[in-house]
Image (cartoon, rainbow, N blue to C red):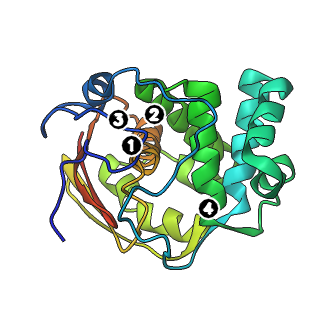
Amino acid sequence: MPTHNCAESHAPRLDREAPATGVSVKAQCHAFGRRRRPAALLWQAPPGMPRAKPHSEVKGLWFTVARRYLTERYGQATVDECIARLGERHGAVLAEPLPSQWYPEEALQQTLAVLDVVIAHGDQALYVQIIEECSLLAVHHFFRALLRLVPPATMLRKVPTMWSLIRRGAGKVAVDADDHHGVVRYAEFPYFDDVNYRLLTLGAIRALMTLCGAEHARVELVGHTADSLVVDVVY
């Protein structure tokens, strides 16, 4: 399968191209623009994308943290709006998530779409910031072992472990990292044509760099296919 530029998307949510490789996350997000779309539209598979995907589940911890973040930062009314937009099936997950329960990937995909509509309002730079803040909250409350100060390379090498703690089913993660540079490769995870998953990855890795004192690290999406993503980190 050919590799696409990370800024291209077959999802209806993205209608602009990002800069070429070598541009910082902040600049990439700025280049995406403050796109807008009808508020009622959640993520849909683009034409030609197979709708049947390998089985994938997400730990309820993700939804627990998201709900806590939304409540503390934006208030209960915003939480209620997100739940209402998710509908009965997926709204119940955000309304009463169980941290140890496994939920279908579709619940996360729709929740990410709702966060874009209700909170970010189509601003992709803001979206990455939201994910970063949410990820920091998750680490502070549920992954305390990661909080000790470690070098950025060591922190990046924890990414596969964190992936296995919050996911099961589809997806593999590999990391190559030295004292100044790291590459994180995601494979066999067929959700990267949805731009929200790419922004989710950016925000999560930025949070990890912040935790280890490398908040000014350059984090870039350097390429993706429908089921793979490559992230380059310079610290």
Where is residue 87 drawn, in percent x and y? 78, 48
Q: Nearer the viewer, mark 4 or mark 3?
A: 4
Task: Name the disc covering residue 106, or none.
Answer: 4
Q: Of marks 4 and 1, which one's residue comes earlier in the chain?
A: 4
Q: CA distance from mark 2 to mark 1?
A: 7 Å
Task: Tell me which amino acid carries mark 3.
Answer: Ala
Task: Tell me which amino acid carries mark 4.
Answer: Glu
Q: Is the C terminus in the top left, top right, bottom left or bottom right quadrant?
A: top left
Whether label 2 touches label 1, CB < 8 Å: yes
Task: Tell me which amino acid carries mark 1.
Answer: Leu
Where is residue 62 drawn, in percent x and y? 66, 53
For image coordinates 54% across by 53% down, the residue present is 146
Q: Of marks 2 and 3, which one's residue comes earlier in the chain?
A: 2
Q: Of marks 1 and 3, which one's residue comes earlier in the chain?
A: 1
What element does badge 4 sit on?
A: helix
The residue that mark 2 highlights is 128
Task: Name the disc covering residue 115, or none.
Answer: none
The residue that mark 3 highlights is 214
What element does badge 2 sit on?
A: helix
Front-lying residue, 119 or 68: 119
Label 1: how many residues lie within 10 Å, few (<14), some (14-19) or many (20+)? Answer: many
Q: Nearer the viewer, mark 2 or mark 3?
A: 2
Taking 24 as reference, is 10 left or right? right
Task: Tell me which amino acid carries mark 2.
Answer: Val
Front-lying residue, 63 or 12: 12
What element does badge 1 sit on?
A: helix
Q: Of marks 2 and 4, which one's residue comes earlier in the chain?
A: 4
The residue that mark 1 highlights is 202
Where is residue 144 drawn, in percent x and y? 63, 51
Label 2: how many residues lie within 10 Å, few (<14), some (14-19) or many (20+)? Answer: many
